[in-house]
Image (spheres, rainbow, N blue to C red):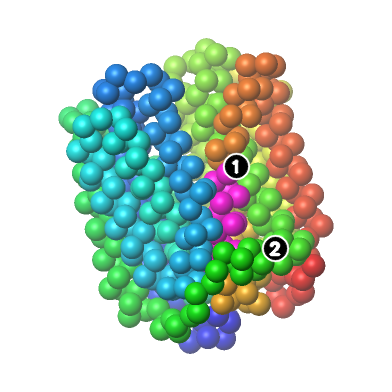
Amino acid sequence: MTATSAAAVPRTGRGPFAGLPREAVILSAVSFTVALGYGIAAPAIPAFARQFGVSVAAAASVISAFALMRVAFALPAGRLVDRFGSRRVMAIGIVVVAASSVLAGFSQSFAQLLVLRGVGGLGSAMFSVSAQALLLASVPGGQRGRASGLYTGGFLLGGITGPALGGVVAAWSLRAPFFLYGGLLVVPAVIAAVALGTAARPVAARAAAGPRESLAVLAGALRSRAYRAVAAVNFADGFAVLGVRGAIIPLFVRDSLHHSATWTGIGFLVFAALNGAALLPAGRVADTLGRRPVMVAGCAVAAAGLLLLAVLPGLWAYLGALAVAGAGSGLLDVAPSAMLGDLLGAQARRGGVLIAFFQMAGDAGTVIGPVVAGLLVDSASYPAAFGVAGGVLAAAALLALLAPESHGGRDASP
């Protein structure tokens, strides 16, 4: 969809959403609700799994099953978007997550829980690919950075609020968060099926794309330096900022700083606060100066934060380093998706596959990052793990620097 067609949609008139299409508002609300529900269930998952008498590693695999299914089903989800349209696939994906969550709450064995969380990951892939496809198709190029920031902000706010509420609910019953998660998802499912039905333009019938055709489209996109850059930056963000931070920081606080888990939570809150504060300014800069400088700066700032963790001792240095990394992550939450939207113009008919691979790169980084960092901590040290994470971000920054700018009508071809 071109920027001209997107400009014809009704727009909002006030606040941070001023001038944006209705889809941006609706999708940001959907992202908040989905993240809130996931955050409510997240604290209960390992403890609930342990009730079946399994090891800690097996309990953690329930979380991994969700993430791995997101990675495995991303490209098929993209093909579904290309075939049936974003709104329909998004509604079905949310329903799959909701149903699997409620059924997981009724699990009578570890195997049932593991399978149902895997099914939830499948639905999550359908939702995330279709929601981003609809967002990027609905917003003109000059507003994609700001819209991406608001959409990500919905996830961030829901992700912060959910675990706090989930901890309270889990203290009452370890099954209750699953039921609450499933119930909350009724709201975004209705929004996707009804509210977006009046906001989104009709989707023309499309011929089914076979796996070979989809792979050909993806192979063509990977010849573009700009597309390689956005995929690499999303992988680096998942690997270093999400994967390594989430998995290694709690252990680092305990083993190296010798402080309680309370300081892990404080550090994560500092990270989230700076991440959220950076989203809207980063979006505006990406919409005015361009996507590439924001991507390069985001990788550099996030890498600097991780390297500060590696070299500076002490609690205050730890909090400062996470603040720096959080600000860099805020830049990375905006510019790559905005550039991706710019690149989809020539591939609008098969854009779902390209969005799917972009998201799959980030999910793969989130899965691989903790494993690599854990091996480095065991074989070397925490600074080595943080240093490698910073190196991954630096490599992505180089690819972004070498990529052509996509904003403002500039050529982003190979």
Residue drawn at x 30%, y 70% is 193
Q: Which mark is residue 161?
A: none
Along the line of sight, the residue nearer the viewer: 129 or 109: 109
Residue drawn at x 76%, y 63% is 223
Q: Is residue 91 above or below residue 69?
A: below
Q: Is residue 290 left or right of residue 334?
A: right
Q: Is residue 226 above or below residue 48?
A: below
Helix, strand or loop at label 1? It is: helix
Q: Position of residue 288 (x, y in %)?
A: 67, 69
- Mark 2 is surrounded, within 10 Å at the Cα level, by few (under 14), some (14 to 19) or many (20 or more) other residues, namely few
Q: Is residue 73 above or below residue 58?
A: below
Q: Which mark is residue 365?
A: 1
Our reading of the magenta stretch's main secondary structure is helix
Residue drawn at x 66%, y 54% is 231
Helix, strand or loop at label 2? It is: helix
Q: Which mark is residue 219?
A: 2
On the question of residue 320 being in view, the answer is no
Q: Name the kind of residue labelled 1 in the image.
A: Gly
| Separation of residues labelled 1 and 2 (CA atoms) | 20 Å
Q: Is residue 281 left or right of residue 67?
A: right
Q: Give the quadrant of residue 114.
A: top left
Q: Position of residue 345 (x, y in %)?
A: 63, 76
Mark 1 or 2, nearer chain start: 2
Along the line of sight, the residue nearer the viewer: 308 or 235: 235
Residue range highlighted in magenta: 352-365
